[in-house]
Image (tube, rainbow, N blue to C red):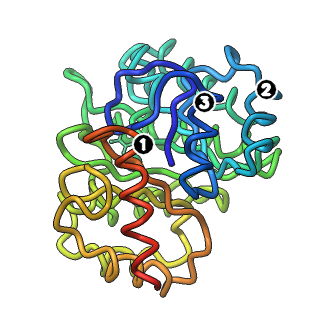
C-alpha cells in the first residue's frame, strides 16, 4: 500500500497523516509492505521510518519521488538548469534510504513535462542525461530505479509502455526498469496484457488501481487477466495499491486487498 511520509497534494495516495498509525493500520489489513512517498529524504529520520516498518512486520519495496515535482516543481526537464540539477540531486539523496530499506526508487513525475519554449528533442535529451546520471550513482549502491509511464493528462513525456521501453534502451543501465501502473495503462495501452508481456523482465515494480483510480474491484479492470499476464513474465515483486481513499483510506485498502487475494492466482 502506498503511503506518504508527510502531507501531500497527490490524491491517489490513500494514507496520509501520522506515519506510525498508518503503518500499523496497513499491517493489520494484511499487506506485506508499504511503498513510501518521500518529498525530501534529508527531512526524514531514516532509522525511525525503517524501525516503524520493521516493527510492524512490513518491508518497503519502493520509494516514490513525485512530491518533489508536485510540491516543489523540480524536474529533469525544466528550462532552468539549476532546477534540473536539483531534481537530479534530490534523486541521488534517495539512494541511501533506498539502500538501507532494500527499496527501489520510482521516477514518475520527477521527469517533468515538455515545457513551453523547449523542443521535445531537447526535453528528451535532458531526461536521458538525468537518468544516465542517477542510474550511475544508484548502481554504486546496488539500487534500482523504475521509470513509470504516466498517462497523457499528467505528463507529455513517456505515456505509453512502448515509449518507456525505448527510453530504457537509450539510457542503457541495467538498474533501470519500468514501473507499470494499471490506471495509466487503462488510458494509454491498446491491450494492458500485451503491454505487460512486451516488458518481460524489465518490470521492476507494479501499481494497481482500478479504471477509475479507486481500489481494485471498484471499476471495470479485469485484474485476474492482468495479474496473470504479470506473473507470466516471471515477476516476483510487489503489487502496490496506489488508489484514491474512497470511500475512506482503510475501507478502500481492505476492499482492494480482498479483491486481489480472492482471485487466487
Ligand atoms: C505515481 O505513481 C503515479 O501514478 C502518478 O499518477 C503520479 O501523479
Ligand atoms: Mn503509479
16 left or right of 44? left
Toward the viewer: 60 or 103? 60
Q: Is residue 137 above or below residue 214?
A: above
Residue at the spot of label 2: 48
Foreground mark, 2 or 3, reads 3
Q: Indicate which disc residue 21 carries.
A: 3
In the image, what residue occupies the spot 45% across and 32% down? 66
Which is more N-terminal, label 3 or label 1? 3
Image position, residue 126 (x, y; %): 44, 34
Foreground mark, 2 or 1, reads 1
Q: Is residue 22 above or below residue 206?
A: above
Which is more N-terminal, label 3 or label 2? 3
Residue at the spot of label 1: 250
In the image, what residue occupies the spot 76% across and 20% down? 45
Structural crowding at the residue carrying mark 1, measured as other residues with C-alpha within 10 Å and reported as few (<14), some (14–19) or many (≥20): some
Q: Is residue 84 above or below residue 253?
A: above
In the image, what residue occupies the spot 53% across and 38% down? 64
Image position, residue 215 (x, y; %): 31, 54
Secondary structure type for disc 1: helix
Circles 1 and 3: CB atoms closer than 8 Å? no
Which is more N-terminal, label 1 or label 2? 2
Structural crowding at the residue carrying mark 3, measured as other residues with C-alpha within 10 Å and reported as few (<14), some (14–19) or many (≥20): few
25 left or right of 189? right
Amino acid at each position: 500500500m502506498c503511503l506518504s511520509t508527510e502531507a501531500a497534494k497527490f490524491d491517489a495516495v490513500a494514507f496520509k497523516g501520522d506515519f506510525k498509525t498508518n503503518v500499523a493500520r496497513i499491517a493489520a489489513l494484511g499487506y506485506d509492505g508499504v511503498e513510501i512517498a518521500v518529498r525530501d529524504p534529508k527531512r526524514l529520520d531514516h532509522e525511525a521510518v525503517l524501525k516503524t516498518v520493521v516493527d510492524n512486520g512490513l518491508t518497503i519495496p519502493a520509494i516514490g519521488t513525485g512530491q518533489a515535482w508536485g510540491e516543489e516543481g523540480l524536474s529533469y526537464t525544466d528550462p532552468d538548469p539549476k532546477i534540473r540539477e536539483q531534481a537530479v540531486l534530490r534523486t541521488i539523496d534517495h539512494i541511501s534510504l533506498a539502500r538501507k530499506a532494500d527499496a527501489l526508487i520510482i521516477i514518475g513525475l520527477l521527469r517533468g513535462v515538455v515545457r513551453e519554449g523547449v523542443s521535445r528533442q531537447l526535453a528528451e535529451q535532458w531526461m536521458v542525461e538525468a537518468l544516465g546520471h542517477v542510474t550511475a550513482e544508484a548502481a554504486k549502491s546496488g539500487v534500482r530505479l523504475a521509470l513509470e509511464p504516466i498517462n497523457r493528462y499528467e505528463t507529455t513525456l513517456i505515456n505509453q509502455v512502448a515509449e518507456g521501453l525505448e527510453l530504457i534502451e537509450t539510457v542503457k543501465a541495467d538498474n533501470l526498469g519500468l514501473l507499470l501502473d494499471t490506471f495509466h495503462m487503462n488510458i494509454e495501452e491498446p491491450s494492458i496484457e500485451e503491454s505487460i508481456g512486451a516488458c518481460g523482465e524489465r518490470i521492476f515494480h507494479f501499481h494497481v488501481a482500478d479504471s477509475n483510480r479507486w481500489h481494485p474491484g471498484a471499476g471495470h479492470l479485469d485484474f485476474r487477466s492482468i495479474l496473470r499476464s504479470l506473473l507470466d513474465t516471471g515477476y516476483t515483486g510487489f503489487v502496490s495499491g496506489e488508489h484514491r481513499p474512497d470511500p475512506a483510506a482503510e475501507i478502500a485498502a481492505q476492499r482492494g486487498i480482498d479483491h486481489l487475494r480472492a482471485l487466487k492466482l
